[in-house]
Amino acid sequence: MPVTQRPAAGGRPGIGRLFPRLPILGDLRLIRRFGWVIPVLIVLVAAIVAYNGRAISQQRGSALVVYTAGRQRALVERYTKDVLVKVDGFQADPKDSGEAMRQPVDVLLDGGSVRAPQGGDARVEIAPARDRKVRLKLEQDRRLINDLIVVGDELLKGGQEAPDYEANVTKLRVLSAQLSSVSNDAVQEITEQSEASLSRLVQIEIALGVLSVLAALGLGLLLRRAGSEQAAQFRSLVNNSSDLITVLAPDGTIAYQSPSVQRMLGRRPGDLAGTELADVVHPDDQDEVNASLARLAEGAPGATDTFGCRLLHNDGSWRHVESICTNLADDPRVNGLVLNVRDVTEQAALRQSISDLLHNLARRSQGLVDRQLELLDELERAEVDPDRLDELFRMDHLATRMRRNVENLIVLSGVDQRRRWSESVPLRDVVEAAVGEVEEYSRVRVAGLHDLTLAGQAASDVAHLVAELVENAASFSSPTTRVEVSGGPTGNGYVLEIEDHGIGMSDAELDEANRRLAEPLAADVAVSRMMGFHVVGRLAVRHGIKVQLRHSWFGGVTALVLLPAVLLGSAGEHPSMAPLVPAGVTASPERLLLANTTKSGWQPRAHLPLRQHAAPPPDHGRDGDAAAGAGEPFD
Amino acid sequence: MSGGGALEGGRTWSRHYRRPYTVTGGRTRPAHDLELETLVQAVTGIDEQLAELGREQRAIAALSREVVSVAEISARLDLLVGVTRVIVGDMAHQGMVVLYRPQATLADADPPVELLERVLHGLKKIS
């Protein structure tokens, strides 16, 4: 993409430029880069908890060891006393207390279980002492105990009469004292060690705490940096995007344009600042742009709207653009309308050429169908045989439906080149023509239409519109039921009702159909599949007609077509209607009828000047010029 | 405006778009046997029914206040003969008009000169 390789004009060069078009990638990179922090934090916390647990159990073990060592001292004293008492001839059991005396030191050295400090027969396990110093003391303890027991045994064996009695007693007491002292040392050592480990634990915990704080700080900093990177990336996105970002100040002047303006309109970014947007909008598109912007300005903050228009390129050509606008007037950082403008000139050209192709083909077909119908007119005029006339009528019907399709295609092509029938047409004729364009026209009943006329330039379109709706009604109802077309005046026009007695539509289908009627799209494949509603929508838009589908009281669907008053006139103004009114006939039937009998038809010449001299009726306000300029078709 | 201009000059929108078969609902065979020279006359009191009728019926009703032939109606209203016959036949069926079959007069040895003149007049108008 050559666009991204251009130096960012005014943009900050940075890491964001590498991915200027894919903001989502930024987020992924963020996760990839800082994702390791989370497992590391989890491991840290787990380590702290485990270490704490181990330290606490160690602490408890140490206390037990101290207790056991202390108890051993008492046992040594008891053994010494037992030996002396026994030697003195009293009742005692030095053998038992000797075993008891051995036990704690064995347990402390080799591991095993001892009676719990508190409570009955419960026993607790003690792991072998690991520390070298403690073990040395305990080994010494064990040796001394062995010596003590040897001396004790000698004393017990020899009794008071033995020659070395005195010496052995002294030896026993000395050993006992030594043992006490060594045990004391061991206890001391263990206590000191456990204190040291405790303080080490505290230190480690403090260190971990500090580490966590540092990690949090680091993560925050990294995230902030990532945020600023994203901001840079976004800026770069704006600067390098092929879309033109334009900010409009509340007064309609251009406040900012992104550098894409160079590419799109051939101007430097600051060139248009301060000028009116309207200065570069094609005159024909001003209304749409203004309407869109006005809607946006009146709408809620943050609302969006879209429009398409042509913008003036610096070289004088027009670029087709589509714009998505957002109202950010209440955002103090923007304070205006933001337009995201996209260049669609190429698509527009493509669409135009397809439209032209469609239009040309349809025009040719239209010419052929018209000639076919004229020929049929001639044949039908001369035909008196009912059977042959019936065949001609069937051909006529087919050709008429073909003409409707062809003329719909012209509408879909979007090329606005319509036949300008200058004179207004009885509404009844328009509806009857529409009925004739439908396959099952014999099922359709027209009733209760008022004597109104329709502006000539809308007549064909209204006929095709009604034909689509009637055809829809006929094809979605039983062939044995009728489709009723009726009408009635409303405050702002005239409403045609097309009602069927079919199975109806669900609410969702009805909503969907009404939505499609309200927003006709550009011609595409999807449209060709549901052409009917689309054609109706397009035809309606051309003449300001509103079409709506509703549930019918009879179970089917009613299509309402609101013809705006500007298209309508009263029947009296229409020349071809006048002689049909009985009152006019009774006045002077003979003269009128003779006047009507002309070769071009039964239009009374006598009435034409009346229409020309009369003030233009309101429904001709729009095409008044065309009607006057086209001259009289009957002359 | 290639096609439009040519059409604009000679024919009105209604003649161009409102096809003749819609007038009769596609029917081509009249309810009564009708000849071109069959005479038609509206019954009195037809005015009350006019509001219900289509444009052609109203025009025929207006024309046939005096006795006219089917051919004359067709010519004056610029309606196809086939269509005129169907409509007049329907109106006769509904009792809105009375038909005077030409056979009755032709059976006489001496048809009225007035009638022959009217037929001639009507034929001239068709051509």
Image (cartoon, rainbow, N blue to C red):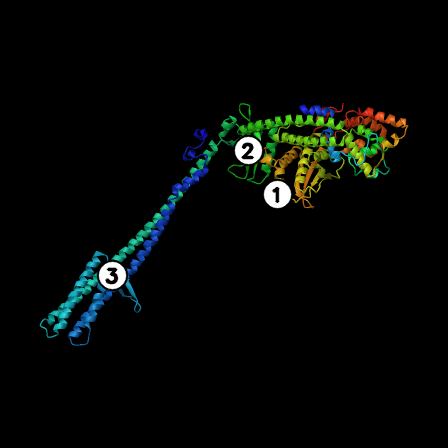
Is residue A78 something one can see in this rendering? no
* Quadrant hosting residue A9: top left
Residue nearest the observer in this picture, A334 or B29: B29
Please give the count of numbered marks on the rendered protein: 3
Mark 2, secondary structure of its residue: strand
Is residue A233 something one can see in this rendering? yes
Residue nearest the observer in this picture, A593 or A338: A593
Q: Amino acid at mark 2?
A: Ser
Dot 2 or dot 1: first in sequence order is: 2
Q: Position of residue A347 (x, y in %)?
A: 54, 29
Q: Can you say which quadrant of the picture contains the N terminus of chain B?
A: top right
* Quadrant hosting residue A220: top left
Is label 2 or label 1 in front? 1
The residue indicated by pointer 3 is A111
Circle on res. A509: 1
Dot 3 or dot 2: first in sequence order is: 3
Mark 3 Cα within 10 Å, few/some/many (few <14, many 20+)? some
Q: Amino acid at mark 3?
A: Gly
- B84 horizontally vs A410: left or right: right
List the single residue furthest toward the left: A163
Q: Position of residue A199 (x, y in %)?
A: 29, 55
- Image point 80% across, 38% down: which residue? B51
The residue indicated by pointer 2 is A323
